[in-house]
Image: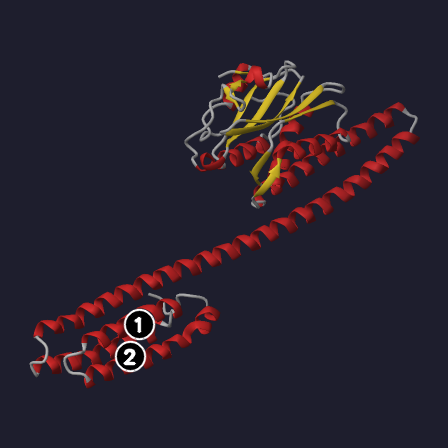
Amino acid sequence: MSDTASPPSDRTARGDLYYPWVALAVVCTWLMWASPGNETIPYHVGWIGLALLYGLGNWRLSRAVTGLALYTLATGVVLVDRAAAGVLSWQETAEIPLMSVLTVLMVWHVRRRQLALAELTVMAERDRKRAESTHRLTRLTSHEMRTPLTIARGYIELLLNREQEPDKVHDLAVVQDELDRLTRVTERLVRVIRLQGDRDVARVDMDAILRETAERWTQVADRHWVVEARAGVYEGSAERVRACLDTLIENAVRYTADEDTVRLIGARDADQIAVGVADSGPGLSDELIGVLNGSPDGDLQPPRDELSQTGLGLSLVRSLVTDRGGRIVAGRSAEGGALMLMVVPLGPRAQVPGELPDAQRVPGGAQGDELLGVETAR
C-alpha cells in the first residue's frame, strides 16, 4: 500500500485526529491496568476509537502501523498479565491477534477506498482539463481558419463582379468553388471537435433546438425548411445535439437543390425519442439503407457516389447515439427522399445499450410511415 492514500491537503486537514486517538488509547490502556477484571470495555473502546477516527482522518500509513503496533503491545501485556494472574482465562488473550487482524483489514479497506477516490479525482481533473483544451482548440480552429477564408471569399466575389473576360471569370469561379469546399471542410472539422469534446448533460428543449437549427440553416441554403417538433425535453448535451443535427442537415443539403424540402423532425413516446432530418432529394438506395441500419457495432462504410464525403461525420453521430443506448435509423421520407433519425431510449433504458429500438419503429407508438412519413427497409 502506498503511504499516501489521499491528497496532501485532505490528509493535513484531518491528520490531527491521530492525536485524539493516541490520548484515547492511553486512557483505555490505563483503565485496563487499573481495573483488574474489567479490561474488556476499555480494551474494545480503544479499538472502536481507532476504527472511527482512522476512517475520518486517514492518517499516513506509518502512523497507522505505529499506533496499531503500540496499542496491540500495550493492551496485550495487560491481558497476558491478567491471564497469568488468573484474573482472566487464557482464552481471552485470543482477542489480541484477532482484534489486530480485524483492524489491519479495516485499515486496508479504508486505504483502498481512499486510493480509488484519489484516482477518480485525478481522472476528473484530467477530463476537465481535456474539455478546456478541446474548447480552446475549437475556438482557435474556428478563428484561424474561418477568418482568412472569409476574407479570401470576399475578394473573389469582388474580382468576379469586376471581371468581364469569360476565361478569367471561369478561373475565378473555380477558385470560389474550392474556397467554398474548404469552408465546408472547416465547418466539418470544427463540428467533429465539438462532437468529441462536449459532455455536459442537462435538460435540453429539443423542440427549441430544432427550430433554432432550422432558422440558422435558412441563411446557409435556399431550401424549403419545415420543422415538426414534438420531442419535448431530453436529458443530454445541447451542443452535441446541435452538432449531430448539423451533420445530418449537411448531408441533406448536399443531396438536394434549391427549393427542395428539408424537414427537421422531433417525436417521442413513453420509452424513446427520435430526432432527425428528412428531405425531398433522390433518397437512399435499399443497399445504403441496409448498411446504415446494420449492426451498431460494425464499421459504417456506406457505398460511395460522386457526392459522398469521408463519412466521418455520420460515423461520429452514430457513435454518440449508441453511447446513449440508441441507434441511427435510415429510411425514405414522405417527400420521397432520405430520412435519418437518431433514436434513443428515455430514462433508465438509456443506460442499457442492449435494448435498442427496432429499425422499423419510431417514437409515438406507430409505424414510421404513420408518424413521420418514413418507410424504413433492411
Name the outermost residue toward the bottom.
Answer: 34
- Residue at x-position 53% and y-position 32%: 318
Question: Which color mode does the image show?
Answer: secondary structure
Location of residue 244 in the rendering, given as x and y in whole percent from the top left corner: 61, 34
Local packing at callout 1 (Cα closer than 10 Å; few below 14, some 14-19, many 20+) is: many
Mark 1: which amino acid? Leu
Q: Which quadrant holds the N terminus?
A: bottom left
Location of residue 218 in the rendering, given as x and y in whole percent from the top left corner: 76, 29
Would you place residue 117 above or below residue 300 in this image? below
Q: Is residue 302 visible?
A: no
Judge by depth and name the residue closer to the eye, 183 or 19. Answer: 19
Would you place residue 178 above or below residue 377 in this image? below
Location of residue 226 in the rendering, given as x and y in whole percent from the top left corner: 70, 23
Mark 2: which amino acid? Ala
Q: Which residue is disc 1 drawn over?
A: 50
- Which disc number belongs to residue 8? none
In the drawing, does residue 235 fall left or right of residue 74?
right
Local packing at callout 2 (Cα closer than 10 Å; few below 14, some 14-19, many 20+) is: many
Mark 2 or 1, nearer chain start: 2
- Residue at x-position 84% and y-position 34%: 156
Q: How many marks?
A: 2
Q: Are marks 2 and 1 in contact (CB under 8 Å)?
A: yes
Q: Quadrant of residue 72?
A: bottom left
Report helix, strand or loop for mark 2.
Answer: helix
Location of residue 15 in the rendering, given as x and y in whole percent from the top left corner: 41, 74
In the drawing, does residue 250 fall left or right of residue 326?
right
Q: CA distance from mark 2 to mark 1?
A: 8 Å
- Which disc number belongs to residue 25? 2
- Residue at x-position 29% and y-position 74%: 65
Would you place residue 279 above or below residue 77 in this image? above
Q: Quadrant of residue 333?
A: top right
Would you place residue 169 above or below residue 88 in this image? above
